[in-house]
């Protein structure tokens, strides 16, 4: 099979195959995992860290760790949640290193269709309102909300990540959503 055909086949391979090949040292299989989940991990890191300055470093550190430890992954089909858990822990380490926990400045809000001053001000105000709403959430609610809405975790995965029962996660997410809606009522 020519190299380009093998590369195409890898792009369509399932996560289990890619993990198994990566664990055997196949760099191309690992590159597919990087392309497949890198943007999700960047989005999660950006929202969690509140700063784009550290995002690439955290994601790169995550992939280095993943490459070094992928052979120890017990269930290759769960590589996405495994990668997200690593990036989550890296983000938390960065936040702890800063000595504060409530900096959420860099959420992505869709830009205006037109680049008029009024539209720019509106978009900036909306982004600041969303940042403030996230900052005002209690820490557990904010972490649950970010894992659900940004990382796409299930209730069980969030519970596993935060060491909480799924029923507690559901309650925290419900309260977080209500708080966000209440705080952003003026933007409806």
Image (spheres, grey):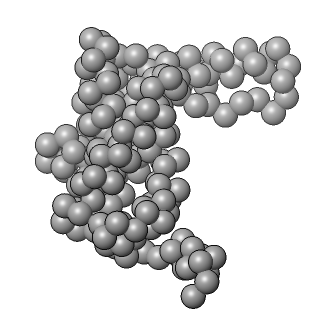
Q: Which quarter shows the C terminus? A: top right
Tally of numbered tags: 0
- Residue drawn at (59%, 22%), measured in percent from left and top? 127
Q: Give the answer, above or below, for where 81 lies relative to 99.
A: below
- Residue drawn at (36%, 39%), measured in percent from left and top? 61
Judged left or right of residue 98, residue 164 is left
Quadrant of residue 25 within the rendered picture: bottom left
- Residue drawn at (49%, 18%), measured in percent from left and top? 105
Judged left or right of residue 68, residue 21 is right
| Residue 39 percent across, percent down from the top left | 52, 47
| Residue 49 percent across, percent down from the top left | 41, 26
The one nearer the camera, 152 or 74, is: 74
The one nearer the camera, 92 or 142, is: 92
Q: Is residue 127 visible?
A: yes
| Residue 45 percent across, percent down from the top left | 43, 35
The one nearer the camera, 168 or 156, is: 156
Q: Is residue 168 visible?
A: no
Q: Give the answer, above or below, for where 35 lies relative to 137.
A: below
Q: Which quarter shows the N terminus? A: bottom right
| Residue 176 percent across, percent down from the top left | 35, 32
As drawn, the residue found furthest toward the top would be 99
Q: Give the answer, above or below, for where 169 lies relative to 109.
A: below
């Amino acid at each position: 099979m020519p190299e380009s055909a093998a590369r195409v086949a890898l792009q369509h391979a399932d996560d289990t195959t890619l993990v198994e090949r990566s664990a055997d040292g196949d760099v191309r299989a690992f590159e597919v995992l990087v392309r497949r989940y890198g943007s999700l991990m960047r989005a999660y890191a950006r929202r969690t860290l509140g700063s784009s300055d550290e995002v690439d470093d955290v994601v790169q550190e995550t992939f280095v760790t993943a490459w070094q430890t992928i052979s120890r992954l017990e269930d290759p089909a769960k590589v996405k949640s495994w990668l997200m858990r690593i990036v989550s822990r890296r983000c938390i380490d960065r936040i702890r290193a800063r000595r504060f926990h409530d900096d959420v400045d860099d959420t992505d809000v869709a830009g205006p269709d037109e680049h008029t001053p009024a539209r720019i001000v509106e978009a900036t105000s909306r982004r600041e309102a969303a940042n403030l709403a996230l900052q005002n959430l209690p820490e557990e609610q904010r972490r649950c909300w970010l894992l659900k809405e940004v990382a796409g975790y299930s209730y069980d995965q969030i519970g596993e990540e935060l060491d909480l029962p799924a029923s507690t996660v559901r309650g925290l997410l419900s309260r977080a959503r209500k708080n966000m809606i209440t705080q952003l009522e003026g933007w409806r």
